[in-house]
Image (spheres, coloured by chain):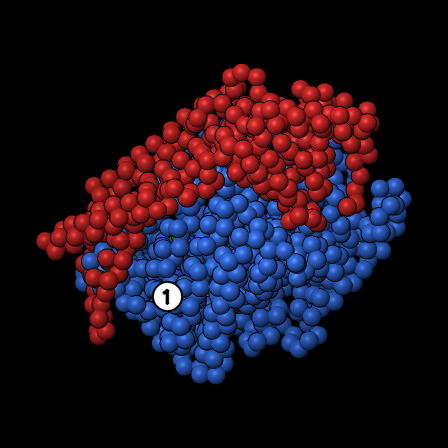
Amino acid sequence: MASRSDLNRAIGIWVVLSIVADLLIGFLLAPHMPPGHFSNTASDQTEINNILALILAPIGVGVITLFLYALISFRQPSGPIQDGPPVKGHRRLQAGWVGVTTLIVVILAITGTVELLQSPSSASGAGSGGGQGGTPISSPSGNPLQVQVIAQQWWFTYRFPQYGGVETFSLALPVDRTVEFHVTSLDVIHSFWAYQLGVKADAVPGADNIAFTVPKHTGLFQIRCAELCGLFHGYMAAHGEVLSQGGFAAWIAKAQKFNAPILRYLPKYAKVYYPDPQQRGG
Amino acid sequence: MTEPATPAAGRSGIFTFNLLWGLVGLVVGYAIGLWIGHRMGSRFDWTGDIDYNDIAILLGYSLGTVGYLAGLGILNHPIARLFGRSGTDLAKGATGWSRYVRASTDHKVIGLQYLIGIGIFFAIGGLDAMLIRTELLRPDDPVFSPGQYLTLVGLHGATMIMMVSSIILGPFGHYFTPIMIGSRRMAFPRMESLSFWLLPLAGVVLTTTIAYGGFPTGWTGYPSLADQADAGMDGYIFAFALVGIGMILNALNMMVTIFNHRAPGMTWSRLPIFVWSMLTTSVLMLLGPPMLLAALLMEVLDRTSGTGFFLSSVGGSPFLFENLFWFFGHPEVYILALPGFGIVLEILPVFARKPLWGQRLGIAGMLGVALLSFMVWQHHLFVSGINASLRPFYMLTTELISVPTGFVFLCGLGTLWRAKIRYTVPMLFACAFFFNFLIGGLSGVYLSDVPSDVTLHGSFFVMAHFHYTIMGGLVFAFFAGIYYWLPKMTGLELNEALGKIHFWTTFVFFNSTFLPLFAVGMLGMPRRTATYAPHLQFLNDWVSISAYLLGCSMLVFIGNFVYSLLVARVPAAANPWMARSLEWQLPSPVPVMNFDRPVRILAGPYEYGDPSAPPVMELGPPVVAAGD
């Protein structure tokens, strides 16, 4: 029957194109997939982006192939209108489609959930780069470096509770040590996005939002606000730096000395701050 | 209610209730409200230190709305009934162009009013987008001031989401739902008129926020930025509330019409898939907007009365707003998507000359999408700091929603398989819908997966994703509907050559505009910013230029519209597509009473290729007094 051979041919084309697409993704796109390998969270996100691309490409290619096959080979040349066969459905095919799509989705959800339960300091802690609120699903091993990110219009500042609550205007992190970000805000909702680190956490006034990462390389990373926060939202950007362990110790010692005079004017270190008066008018 | 046999047009000329007097009422009401508000508001210390008064502005908007509705004559009937009079009929059956600037109870007039009204706001929102892309031509060195840029971003988003969200349900839903089910009217024609006229008012309120300095929050209106914002924010809140009320009224009207006004023989299995999409959309529009209204009311109280629902410093929480907003906001996304599914599945069988393949599966898909859309809203908040143990659940539901969406694709594919496909302009747009929505859907998987979403959340990737589903889905489906149905609505043909030019330019430049934005987002550019990293300039310039060309392709459509309807004026055949559904069995344009005799439905609308299928309907014997 004609329909059977049409379907077989379309599926053949799909298989070939899927293999080509996955090979292209695997060898050309995957090595360059953002956000890169600067931290454990970033490199795990990169890996997941690649896996999703490899899974989704055959699905997309399949739907497009089948549609294009139908649109090209079943087109009606101009002339009097002819009717197609009055077929209204195919029970087994429909049930199969429902089953297969559900299966794919459940597999995706299970793998995603497993990712979320991993320890933040492990190699596959991708989910822990996102803000998890005050009670993260899993805690890191060892003694993480705590960094409080305080967002306000239109700047980020940082406090280090393990170093006497010193507040700095720039961010430096030690390499190969788990970092525990506590993100909060003094005025409106911001979002702390350290792109290369694979960290994003909304800064919500009155809330403590925890995110983890383990920087793997030294160098600069980009920090941007990722939630619309008013007039200069587009300019709320900075660079942070990952230093060697020794470099970080020197940096934080210098920061403690340099910022000591202002420390006594700052409020005591806390999870959240309520500036008073919190008043209207930008 | 009995329709008058001879339509009573009422008085004509400008000294009757019409849009002009509505606008006069708006201005007068606004002035009165402003005056009262200033008398009230000046007593409070929190309005004392700023140079505007939220209470006055919101009272002005409220009384302005009353004046506007009174001027339009929408309040005549309720007031007359209040005093025990028999009530006045709005101008059903009036002829001439003046009926389009008056409140009407003819669902066909309202459909065309929607088409023009929404078309104007679609154009305004599109121009905003052009200006945004102009700013993004250069990574720094801004064209607009930061405030102007945020105003543009907010107006583009809000205009598109508020005004254009009913771009299918408004024009086509109102025009064709009653006809497709064999009815002479909607269930509540006066309410239908009210729900339309609230929309242009919302548009005026929204657009005039420019005079108050705009609003800085984008279309989402998050506190505490919304509490901090200037008077433009009041316009955003009021406009969104009007739109929300209009949605609820629309939904009730549509549901009651579909449940109660089907002609004899129009069983649920014979109900056209477009009507099913209107029904499922109405379920969402009934259940989502009340949450929005609640959130907006709290925001109003925070701004005017010193409450602190969303202010954490006095015990409130911004999370409350985020949850309430997205509980409305995510169903809203499907309010935009479902009508598109309906239109393309309605159009495919006509040009494939085959029955709709797996119709029940398609309906189940739309119902499934409608149900699941209420269970996914926190995927907008994956990194916001909500309880982390909720994330797996929302990841699962979000990914599950792709299953019923897949049903729609299977229906389309099955209908095209072994069909006799004719490539008309509506068919081209319907096929492109599947391509665009596929990309939108697949990119959505990245956003539903929490680890991936950490990087992509709030970036241009999200922006590209939802433009693929809304612009590539809803708007392409809208154009499919325009080319398919406009001959029926106006009785005039649209030029096919210009239509094809319009399709190909739109399709090519749409993809050229939004496909690179996935890469831009993945490379770290956040949404709604006026500045970006210099190495992204090439991609951004490519996108901007494509966006201008996409804008030009819309000019082709406007040219076609004007040329075909005003210059060429080629009368359309009653059934140019040889379609089976009910609306094509009527003359073009459709007469005022739709069916001049009682209708009985004999068969489903998609029985193509079955020579034994009976005609879709028969008309009963003529009756003298047209009752309904």
Q: Position of residue B438 (x, y in %)?
A: 37, 50
Question: Crowdedness of circle 1 by 10 Å Cα count: few (<14), some, many (20+)?
Answer: many
Q: Residue pushed farthest top?
A: A142
Is residue B124 found left or right of A138 in the rendered image? right
The residue lying toward the viewer, choosing from B345 and B316, is: B316
Asked if residue A215 shows in the view, the reply is: yes
Q: Residue pushed farthest bottom?
A: B567
Mark 1: which secondary structure? helix
Subunit bearing disc 1: B
Q: Which chain is red?
A: A
Q: Position of residue A137 (x, y in %)?
A: 51, 22
Image quarter of residue B72: bottom right
The residue lying toward the viewer, choosing from B395 and B34, is: B395
Q: Residue pushed farthest left?
A: A1
Against B35, is B597 above or below?
below
Q: Where is residue A221 in the image (x, y as percent from the top left)?
A: 57, 39
The residue lying toward the viewer, choosing from A274 and B624, is: A274
Is residue A89 found left or right of B436 in the rendered image? left
Residue at point 78% right, 63% down? B28
Q: Position of residue B272 (x, y in %)?
A: 36, 55
Against A264, is B614 above or below?
below
Is residue B333 found left or right of A254 in the rendered image? left
Give the colour of chain B: blue
Against B409, is A269 above or below?
above
Q: Mark 1 points at which residue?
A: B426
Residue at point 52% right, 38% down? A196
Residue at point 80% right, 39% down? A279
The quarter of the image holding the N terminus of chain B is bottom right
Image quarter of residue B609: bottom left
